[in-house]
Image (cartoon, rainbow, N blue to C red):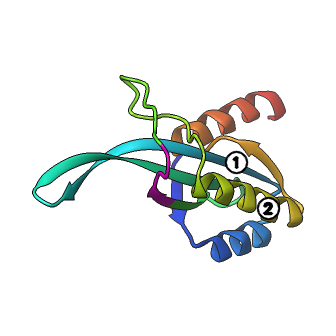
Amino acid sequence: MAVKVEDKSLKDFLKAVKEADIRRVLLTDYATVEPKHEGGAVVLVGMVQVVATALDRKPAPKVIYRWSEKDESERMVTITAGTGRGRNPGGRLAARKEQVFQVLREEGLEVDEGEWTPATAEAYMASRKSIVG
């Protein structure tokens, strides 16, 4: 089963979710480190990304609607070695995540922590099929 990912602006994300009659959205944030040129040097800069995803199970192929916003962290980012990812310790995008959470709730959506990916969507659909049929 193929799962297509469609990146959207927040406005288009909300519109797609509403049109598809989706009730559950996953929202998360990630902290990463990326190289950045500063003067003649390359430095590692903490980056924070907020991501909202929604799975539309109706069409074939299945579709994941995705919105994200990424910016430099205003605070130190701690990365767990071997994973390349860490938690967002705060700052502007942490506040943005809370704002997006509130907008999603005002739209009547159930919001859980996480992110839909093609792999998680396929695993969910297989599990759902074995339970519901």
Residue 118 image offset from top left, x and y in percent = 53, 45
| 133 to the left or right of 38 | right
**Residue 37 visible within the image:** yes
Label 2 close to label 1 by CB (< 8 Å): no
| 2 to the left or right of 56 | left
Seen from the viewer's position, the closer of residues 22 and 122 is: 22
Amino acid type at image mark 2: Leu
Amino acid type at image mark 1: Leu
Gap in angstroms between the C-alphas marked 2 and 1: 10 Å
Residue at screen point 72% across, 75% down = 15
Residue 78 image offset from top left, x and y in percent = 45, 32
Residue 93 shown in magenta: no
Numbered badge on residue 121: none
| 124 to the left or right of 19 | left
Residue bounds of the magenta highlight: 70-75
Mark 2 Cα shell of 10 Å, populated few (<14), some (14-19), many (≥20): some
Residue at screen point 41% across, 27% down = 83
The quadrant in which the N terminus is found is top right
Look at mark 1 in the image and give the residue it sits on.
26
Seen from the viewer's position, the closer of residues 85 and 26 is: 85
Look at mark 2 in the image and give the residue it sits on.
104
The quadrant in which the C terminus is found is top right
